[in-house]
Amino acid sequence: TDRGLALKSSSCETVCQGVEYCVEQYALPTGEPVVAYVLKYDPGVAQLCTGTPNGTYDYRNQQQTVMEEALYAQKQGKQVIAAFNADFFDMFGDCAPSGLCVKDGQIVANPDSDRFFFGITKDGRHIIDNLAGQPWLLEDLEHAVGGRELLLRDGEIWDVAVGESFGYTPHPRTVAGLCGDGSVVIAVVDGRRPWHSNGATLYD
């Protein structure tokens, strides 16, 4: 349901030509704050790359923070503009991602997953899709990271997990979107820090 989240302020800056970064401050009717960090970019300027611990294609029992993976990519000569977390993973087992993972055209994990993914094709197109009933998409992916619900389709609410605790409980969130003008949006909502940001439901 609509919790009445209201935008209070937005501060934006141009990171480089074709890339904009914004910090958005929201508040609930009770006054509790919610903070979102939003990156919008032209896919002709910036491209998605899948990060893995030390660049490995074998995820088993390997862990690294997003910052550590970004720094590793920089050392390999990539110009890293931004880095964000993606997919769930087995925190108490072998660190396997929950959904599809493709890196440099190689399948890292779960080629049979029917979960939604955010990816980039070998010809540079950004896509949000799943492999259910269309396994041929896998052959065209250069990079892909797993997701869960498809929140919007053609600008309309599609699936916000109504009735599921995962959907209606405020959590930190990472979402990716494709805009009508061809740009890509990545939004990260901070959470579980009540003095700073209280997370978001999927409806938020």
Image (cartoon, rainbow, N blue to C red):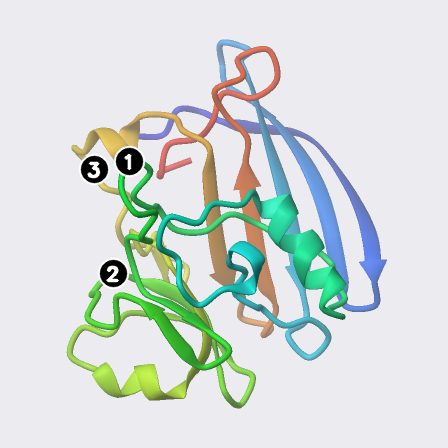
In the rendered view, would you say 194 is above or below 157? above
Horizontal side of residue 50 vs 146, given as left or right: right
**Amino acid type at mark 2:** Arg
**Amino acid type at mark 3:** Val
In the rendered view, would you say 19 is above or below 149? below
Q: In the rendered image, which residue does mark 2 sit on?
A: 115
Q: In the rendered image, which residue does mark 1 sit on?
A: 92
Q: CA distance from mark 2 to mark 3?
A: 17 Å
Q: Quadrant of the N terminus?
A: top left
Specify the label residue 196 is tagged with. Answer: none
Horizontal side of residue 167 vs 186, given as left or right: left
Q: In the rendered image, which residue does mark 3 sit on?
A: 162
**Amino acid type at mark 1:** Phe
Q: Quadrant of the C terminus?
A: top left
Name of the residue lying farthest toward the front: 61
Residue 87 image point, x, y percent: 38, 51
